[in-house]
């Protein structure tokens, strides 16, 4: 008779297949260790015999470390402090003189559309190859628009499935997508003249 035993105590897996007597013997060997001892992991390799499992079974399994997401910061070219999307700063070197005329041509009804218009201004009018979130923040301020409460989330929304206007990889890596270009050229409502 073929028997299978699978125990998962917080990923200290014991997986045994074979004769009923063999499974009982291995279970008896590891019963106390499973309930009282350190976490163990026994997984037979495809070429391994079930009777060979008992020799490899006592190896302790390391607990995986919890991964934390680091805050994304980068040094600017001028050597100033990094760009952080959650706490944006005004870019004092950005010339926003033509922003009002450019921005007033469009009826941006939500933050993803506003970010798209600001990025088009930065790329096309200011000729900035790689705009960052601080420059978009400066555009919000210069256009006298309400800044989103969670600033970095507005970029995630603009790059999400619903809109997809930009690729937001980091505060210094903002790229307008094909969807964003098409929306800007063909679908953005222009203000009535």
Image (spheres, helix red, strand yellow):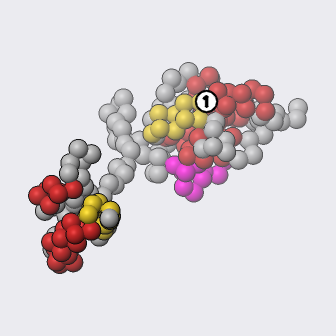
Task: Give the extent of the magenta segment.
Answer: 143-154
Residue 103, horizontal then vertical, whole percent: 71, 35
In which quadrant is the C terminus drawn? top right
In which quadrant is the N terminus drawn? bottom left
**Vertical arrangement, residue 98 with respect to residue 50, above or below:** above
Residue 175, horizontal then vertical, whole percent: 54, 30
- Residue 78 seen in the figure: yes
**Residue drawn where x is 61% and y is 30% of the image:** 177
**Vertical arrangement, residue 180 with respect to residue 11, above or below:** above
Q: Report the residue that reaches farthest toward the left.
A: 55
Image check: 126 left or right of 40? Answer: right
**Vertical arrangement, residue 190 with respect to residue 64, above or below:** above
**Residue drawn where x is 15% and y is 72% of the image:** 29
**Residue drawn where x is 51% and y is 31% of the image:** 131
- Residue 98 seen in the figure: no
Q: Nearer the viewer, residue 173 or 100?
A: 173
Residue 129, horizontal then vertical, whole percent: 51, 23
Provide the residue designation for mark 1.
177
Image check: 90 left or right of 11? Answer: right
Label 1 crowd (10 A; few <14 / some 14-19 / many >=20): some
Residue 184, horizontal then vertical, whole percent: 72, 30
- The stretch drawn in magenta includes residue 117: no
Q: Nearer the viewer, residue 157 or 17?
A: 17
**Residue drawn where x is 55% and y is 51% of the image:** 153
Helix, strand or loop at mark 1: loop
**What is the magenta segment's predominant secondary structure?**
loop
Q: Report the residue that reaches farthest toward the right.
A: 193
Image check: 113 left or right of 74? Answer: right
């Amino acid at each position: 008779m073929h028997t299978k035993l699978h125990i998962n105590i917080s990923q200290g897996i014991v997986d045994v297949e074979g004769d009923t007597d063999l499974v009982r013997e291995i279970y008896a060997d590891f019963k106390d260790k499973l309930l009282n001892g350190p976490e163990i992991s026994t997984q037979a390799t495809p070429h391994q015999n079930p009777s060979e499992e008992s020799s490899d079974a006592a190896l302790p399994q390391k607990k995986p470390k919890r991964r934390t997401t680091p805050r994304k910061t980068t040094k600017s070219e001028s050597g100033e402090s990094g760009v952080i999307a959650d706490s944006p700063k005004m870019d004092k070197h950005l010339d926003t003189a033509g922003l009002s005329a450019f921005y007033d041509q469009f009826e941006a009804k939500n933050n993803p559309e506003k970010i798209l218009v600001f990025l088009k201004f930065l790329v096309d009018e200011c000729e900035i190859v790689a705009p960052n979130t601080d420059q978009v923040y400066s555009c919000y301020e210069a256009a006298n628009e309400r800044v989103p409460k969670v600033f970095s989330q507005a970029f995630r929304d603009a790059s999400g499935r619903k809109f997809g206007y930009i690729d937001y990889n980091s505060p210094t890596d903002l790229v307008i997508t094909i969807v964003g270009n098409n929306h800007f050229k063909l679908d953005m409502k222009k203000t009535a003249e």
